[in-house]
Image (tube, grey):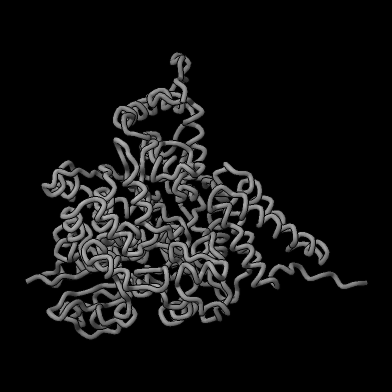
Amino acid sequence: MSITVYVPRDAGALSLGAEAVANAIASEAQQRGLDVDILRNGSRGLYWLEPLVEVSSPAGRIAYGPVEVTDVPALFDADFLRGGRHALALGATEDIPLLKSQQRLTFARVGIVDPRSLDDYRAHGGYRGLDAALATDAAAIVQIVTDSGLRGRGGAAFPTGIKWKTCLDALADRKYIVCNADEGDSGTYADRMIMEGDPFVLIEGMTIAGLAVGASYGYIYLRVEYPHAQRALEAAIASAEEQGYLGSDLRGSGKAFRLEVRMAAGAYICGEETSLLESLEGKRGQVRFKPPLPAIEGLFGKPTVINNVVTLASVPTILDHGAAFYRDYGVGRSRGTLPIQLAGNLKRPGLVERAFGLTLRELIEDYGGGTASGKPVRAVQVGGPLGAYLPASQLDTAIDYEAFAAIGGMLGHGGMVVFDDSVDMAAQARYAMEFCATESCGKCTPCRIGSTRGVEVIDRIVAGDHATRERDGVLLRDLCQTMLDGSLCALGGMAPLPVLSALDHFPEDFSGAVEPAAT
Amino acid sequence: MKRAINITLLPDLPDEVRSVVLDVTARLADMPGALLPVLHAVQGALGYIPPDSVPLIARELNLSRADVHGVISFYHYFRSKPAGRRVIYLCRAESCQAMGAVILEKHVMARLGVDFHQTTANGAYSLEPVYCLGNCACSPAMMVDDELKGRLTPARFDAWLAAEET
């Protein structure tokens, strides 16, 4: 009987040579006359161990990693196909402590199933949420999602059920479900991992959303930087259509839902929901005024639910296990689990799905293992390029939307980028303004002009003497306030957060050039 | 959006460009919001979107030239000039910065002898900045065409380049 060897096809694993490892295992097995079946799964999210190779055994999967091509002959010599001892052996995958301690609901199948196989998806509990949704009516689905306490995981944390209710109540001949897969924030990759590792869960979530609000067509707006996710999604959509999980008659219910992947074109602003809709309509991705809300007047003027990948991918679990099951995880008004993405300067970067409530310190020290460089943590940026830089003294903040708002930050999409003490915070503040200037859609003045002026003022502060620093410091704060108050969307409205937090917590970095000695 | 009225004003186009545009628009023009898919397909086939093709694209989609030009110039991914044989997208975002992207960026520029948005003199490589490739757990990252690379260092970049050139 053949032995199954799992080698991830996740883009992150591929970026570390997983393709070559898979090929090496196949050819080594052939040379040795061994019957090996290589399955290309998603990533478990333990990126410091990628490429992570797993071998099936009667007692579960056995992990080896990180595996390089040159390790492959030695692994065969050590009889890794039967769990043999080797320096890279990690034991049973499920028992790896940093995986075992996680609470994987949305990521339950990522890294486990074959992302190209609908049968495998169903064998691991897939499409039970859709069955539950088909057995009830639209209002009941919306009620379950509302009761679960699920909030938008893309960053704004708006209650999903309320959004769906608004769309359900809107009268129209046509409605749309749009998935925001324009995951542009640095430090975030949860959307990508789902789309590559378990694409059917997103398809199922969108189908349920369609049933909930009466929409029969959905778009996945996918960033062009994710070609691997595109291939995984398109393959999954094709097999879902073939087997009646998408199309004009969902599982014989008479209800229709179709899905299409649309590629973005490298504009960060298109992660903002209204510019995303503009882009889907074939226009420049410029932000729209709200109201009208997209749920009432969205894509092509029709009521539209627009949700992030992780939000939609959390829905099948909620429908399958019930609202209370999901709501019982978490703290305060942050219910359920959050897939947290550890990135930047860390020994063990990777995905950690846990209920809300654990602290930044637990994430960075216990899961992340501290900095990769071994130097002290100086700053953590949470929530992407528009998130605040937190100093080491705030590491005891809990992962909770309200707790982050209370310290002037935002949890956003759950990405954490760690910097060691070599970071120059004035340069990071400048970068935040520069990024905003590059990516501004240009519709509103505070963002379009303010960001450019911001770069200039920071340059003057860093280069200037004491008097200019004082004066320009006041000017920079004033400018930030104008952007916060006057911008049309979150880009201009939040780009000041990293700047102000850098000023507040790391003022010493703005003291610039050493002043010439008085003569 | 206005219709391009006088079709006789369309500039002369090389046959290849004309046939690519007409083939793409024949397939995709009826999609709702077809412009981005059309531009992706044209760039996919030709490697860039020739400015001379804009009037034809506009006519086939019943848009104005300004609409089409405005969209091409808005999105970083669309290019109006041919790229090198391979396009290197180097990540400049925070996670990669925390792992030495700035040093890497300088190294890559010096090694290729180009700045961002430029193509090497021999036409082999174009260098483009990108703000996050979603490979933040394996920073710093770059993508060459659609091949992703992680945990890059100046030495690993040189090794990759050397392998490319043999």
> Residue A130, position in %: x, y?
19, 56
Which residue is rendered at x = 39% and y = 71% of the image? A350
> Which is nearer the eye, A340 or A267?
A340
> Which is nearer the eye, B75 or A410?
A410
Vertical order, B36 against B25 (above or below): below
> Residue A255, position in %: x, y?
18, 44
Task: Determine whether, in the image, residue B23 is placed left or right of residue B122.
Answer: left
Vertical order, B98 against A58 (above or below): above
> Residue A366, position in %: x, y?
42, 82
Please tell me how many numbered marks the rendered image carries: 0
Q: Within the image, what quadrant is residue A71 found in? A: bottom left
Which residue is rendered at x = 46% and y = 26% of the image? B1
Q: Within the image, what quadrant is residue A61 found in? A: bottom left
Q: Residue furthest left?
A: A1
Quadrant position of the C terminus of chain B in the picture: bottom left
> Which is nearer the eye, A460 or B1?
B1
Please say whether residue B159 is visible from this viewpoint: no
Vertical order, A13 against A304 (above or below): below
Which residue is rendered at x = 32% and y = 54% of the image? A229
Which residue is rendered at x = 83% and y = 64% of the image? A467
Please say whether residue A174 is visible from this viewpoint: yes
Task: Determine whether, in the image, residue B129 is placed left or right of residue A58.
Answer: right
> Residue A406, position in %: x, y?
55, 70
